[in-house]
Image (cartoon, rainbow, N blue to C red):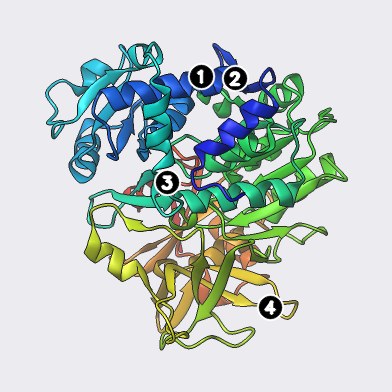
């Protein structure tokens, strides 16, 4: 029977695997029975606090507690909105203003940060009090039962070009179909043990949270501090007998570059999936050689489509300069490559990647104009209002019928009459010996490309460009090279391109 709320996945798992460990963090672990019971108590407490059909802000550290609040909000029939425990108060104020939540769930350590903020009528609820709530089963079941799969399950805030965060609103059906696809595609079972790297305010975490519940497996939350030490992560994977990981490429790159995989013994690890940035083949091949016979998967998708809409199971070794496909659409998703006039591009022709299907977000919370610009009718279908999301990414279908990602439309520049995709330059840079990571930024004021490279050595620009010319034409070469010991990263572990733009023409750089 089709279920209409993602929290029913927890009900099913608790019925089948009551005494199995469901989630583990640094300080605690919960069986499925405990997970469900705690979430239901929290749901009951939220209803008592007046959070009926209104968003619940979850202002807690990444922990099993936060997960219980996510599920508890669903029992109460409410969408949840996870925020960073270290979020700047000015940004939190903007999110609260957008959401107008019913409740903000936090703990005694973080609650003082809310003093002085205009909470727009939201009630502050402490986790310990909610987790001790008495459960009115009839009322709780009625609240959860009133939810249908078109209702929002969560609102996740991403950066907005105007400086105002955008609240991506995902429906229950998106998570239900996504969890089914994750389990089916990677063959996950109750024996699966996942290592959760992604912060909960980053959509990659939904793979771990709902994929593990769907199969009745175990989710081990990696301590945030440990992610900063790539040499220790393989040891953590071995100690916890992790069987599957879904991480951003930056973390995998750092491990490969550190040499931590040399001699690593990870017999339990069967699945290595990645998403969020382009995964360089150079480091991917280090992983594949260290772990032969395992499944490696390149996943693609923006926050607006329930995390992932395309995937490619890596079935061979790719040369450093080869593009790694993003493959084909996931089940219940469809991809169109459209020209600027809205017609479908031919095979081999680059166009904007647009997505249709059950994973497409409902829109941006409380932002109808912004929603109308990004979520629009499929121009190729005039028969009914088929809704699609315009990703702003460029892609094309290759000769094998696989999707090839070409970068962002806004990462494409025009220099001296030439159109240049900065991602192509970054891929070429990764082929140069000594380069461990690379990011290109366009300096509009000086009309030149600045290439930041992560390296432990020295890379004279002229010699560096001679190597680049083996892969890209002269007009694509950078005008400035900035070697760095470490590229800056956002809290989601993606390269922080805004921080790099702030470093333009900084010290330690070379010019042509």
**Residue shown at the point (56%, 15%) measured from the top left:** 26
Badge 1 element: helix
Give how far apart the Cα atoms at labels 1 and 4 are. Answer: 50 Å
Disc number placed over residue 33 in the picture, else none: 2
Of the numbered discs 3 and 2, the one sitting upstream in the chain is: 2
Badge 3 element: loop
Of the numbered discs 1 and 4, the one sitting upstream in the chain is: 1
Give how far apart the Cα atoms at labels 3 and 1 are. Answer: 40 Å
Of the numbered discs 3 and 1, the one sitting upstream in the chain is: 1
- Counting the numbered discs, the total is 4
Asked if residue 396 is positioned above or below residue 39 in the image, the reply reads below
Q: Position of residue 297 (x, y in %)?
A: 71, 52
Where is mark 4, residue-wise? Answer: 398
Asked if residue 366 is positioned above or below residue 381 in the image, the reply reads above
Where is mark 1, residue-wise? Answer: 37
Give how far apart the Cα atoms at labels 3 and 4 are. Answer: 30 Å
Q: Is residue 330 left or right of residue 345?
A: right
Residue 376: image quadrant is: bottom left
Give how far apart the Cα atoms at labels 2 and 4 are. Answer: 48 Å
Q: Are the residues at dot 1 and dot 2 in contact (C-beta closer than 8 Å)?
A: yes
Badge 4 element: loop
Q: Position of residue 374 (x, y in %)?
A: 35, 67
Q: Are the residues at dot 3 and dot 2 in contact (C-beta closer than 8 Å)?
A: no
Q: Position of residue 247 (x, y in %)?
A: 61, 41
């Amino acid at each position: 029977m089709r279920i209409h709320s993602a929290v029913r996945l927890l009900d099913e798992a608790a019925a089948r695997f009551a005494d199995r460990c469901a989630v583990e963090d640094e300080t605690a672990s919960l069986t499925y029975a405990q997970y469900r019971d705690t979430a239901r108590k929290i749901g009951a407490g939220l209803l008592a606090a007046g959070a009926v059909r209104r968003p619940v802000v979850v202002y807690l550290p990444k922990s099993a507690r936060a997960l219980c609040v996510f599920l508890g909000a669903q029992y109460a029939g409410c969408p949840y909105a996870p925020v960073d425990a270290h979020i700047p108060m000015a940004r939190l104020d903007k999110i609260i203003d957008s959401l107008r939540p019913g409740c903000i769930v936090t703990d005694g350590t973080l609650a003082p940060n809310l003093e002085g903020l205009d909470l727009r009528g939201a009630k502050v609820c402490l986790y310990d009090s909610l987790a001790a709530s008495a459960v009115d089963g009839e009322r709780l079941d009625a609240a959860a039962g009133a939810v249908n799969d078109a209702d929002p399950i969560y609102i996740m805030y991403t950066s907005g070009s105007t400086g105002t965060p955008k609240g991506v609103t995902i429906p229950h059906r998106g998570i239900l179909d996504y969890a089914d696809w994750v389990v089916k595609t990677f063959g996950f079972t109750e024996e699966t043990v996942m290592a959760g790297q992604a912060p909960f305010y980053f959509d990659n975490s939904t793979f771990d949270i709902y994929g593990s519940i769907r199969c009745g497996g175990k989710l081990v939350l990696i301590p945030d501090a440990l992610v900063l030490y790539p040499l220790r992560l393989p040891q953590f994977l071995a100690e916890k007998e992790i069987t599957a990981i879904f991480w951003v490429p930056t973390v995998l790159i750092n491990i490969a570059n550190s040499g931590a995989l040399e001699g690593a013994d990870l017999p339990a690890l069967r699945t290595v999936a990645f998403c969020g940035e382009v995964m360089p083949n150079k480091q991917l091949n280090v992983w594949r050689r260290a772990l032969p016979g395992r499944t490696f998967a390149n996943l693609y998708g923006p926050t607006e489509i329930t995390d992932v809409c395309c995937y490619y199971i890596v079935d061979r070794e790719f040369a450093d300069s080869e593009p790694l496909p993003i493959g084909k659409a996931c089940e219940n998703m469809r991809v169109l490559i459209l020209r600027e006039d809205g017609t479908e591009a031919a095979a081999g022709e680059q166009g904007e990647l647009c997505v249709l299907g059950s994973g497409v977000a409902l829109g941006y919370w409380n932002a109808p104009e912004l929603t109308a610009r990004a979520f629009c009718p499929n121009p190729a279908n005039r028969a009914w209002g088929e809704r699609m999301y315009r990703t702003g990414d460029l892609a094309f279908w290759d000769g094998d019928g696989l999707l090839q990602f070409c970068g962002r439309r806004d990462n494409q520049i025009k220099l001296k009459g030439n159109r240049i995709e900065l991602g192509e330059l970054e891929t070429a840079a990764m082929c140069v010996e000594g380069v461990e990571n690379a990011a290109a930024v366009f300096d509009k004021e000086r009309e030149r490309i600045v290439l930041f490279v992560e390296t432990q050595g020295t890379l004279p620009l002229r010699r560096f460009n001679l190597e680049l010319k083996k892969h890209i034409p002269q007009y694509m070469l950078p005008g400035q090279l900035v070697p760095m010991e470490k590229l800056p990263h956002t809290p989601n572990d993606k390269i922080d391109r805004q921080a790099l733009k702030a470093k333009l023409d900084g010290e330690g750089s070379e010019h042509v």
